[in-house]
Amino acid sequence: MSCKRLKPGGKLITIEINDELREFSHSYFCKAGVDSKIIQMTGKAQDIVPGLNQMFDLVYIDGDKREYIEYFKLIVDKVITGGFILADNVLWGEKVLEKTTKDPQTRGIIEFNEMIRKDKSIEKVILPVRDGIMLLRVV
């Protein structure tokens, strides 16, 4: 999402576990002229998200696939009714079709997809672009 499209006073919050990427990312935020609208946080999402005392219009999940269920559970109650969650890599290069896989990343995506499929509190659709993006709407 372009920061130029944020509503007045809006902020974009990023969480990155790799502290070595902070300066790299910040340099591009500055080049784009949007650094004042972006709050960069470094650490594990599981440690940071519980302390975020605000509601979100849009959340983008892309991290350790073994932790997608945990990310979703941490954030879903912080998304406004009618707000969206985007989950990246939900088709995982078609690896999600390998139901008996022992690969922990693939298992994480398969289990996340199954949990979302059963969840009646959200509307969902998978966009089959590259590795798949799931669009979730909190109802």
Image: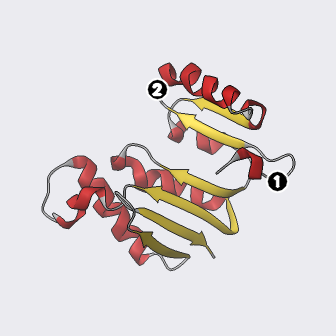
Q: Secondary structure at mark 1?
A: loop
Q: Is residue 120 left or right of residue 84?
A: left
- Residue kind at label 1, given as amino acid type: Lys
* Mark toward the start of the polypeptide (2 vs 1): 1
Quarter of the image where the C terminus is located: bottom right
Q: Residues within 10 Å of mark 1 (few under 14, many from 20)?
A: few
Q: Is residue 45 left or right of residue 53?
A: left
Above or below residue 47? Residue 83 is below
Q: CA distance from mark 2 to mark 1?
A: 29 Å
The front one of 125 and 48 is 125
Q: Is residue 9 left or right of residue 26?
A: right
What residue appears at the point 39 percent right and 48 percent down from the top-left corner? 67
Above or below residue 99? Residue 102 is above
- Residue highlighted by disc 2: 18
The front one of 64 and 4 is 4
What residue appears at the point 61 percent right and 64 percent down from the top-left corner? 84
Identify the image quadrant of residue 111: bottom left
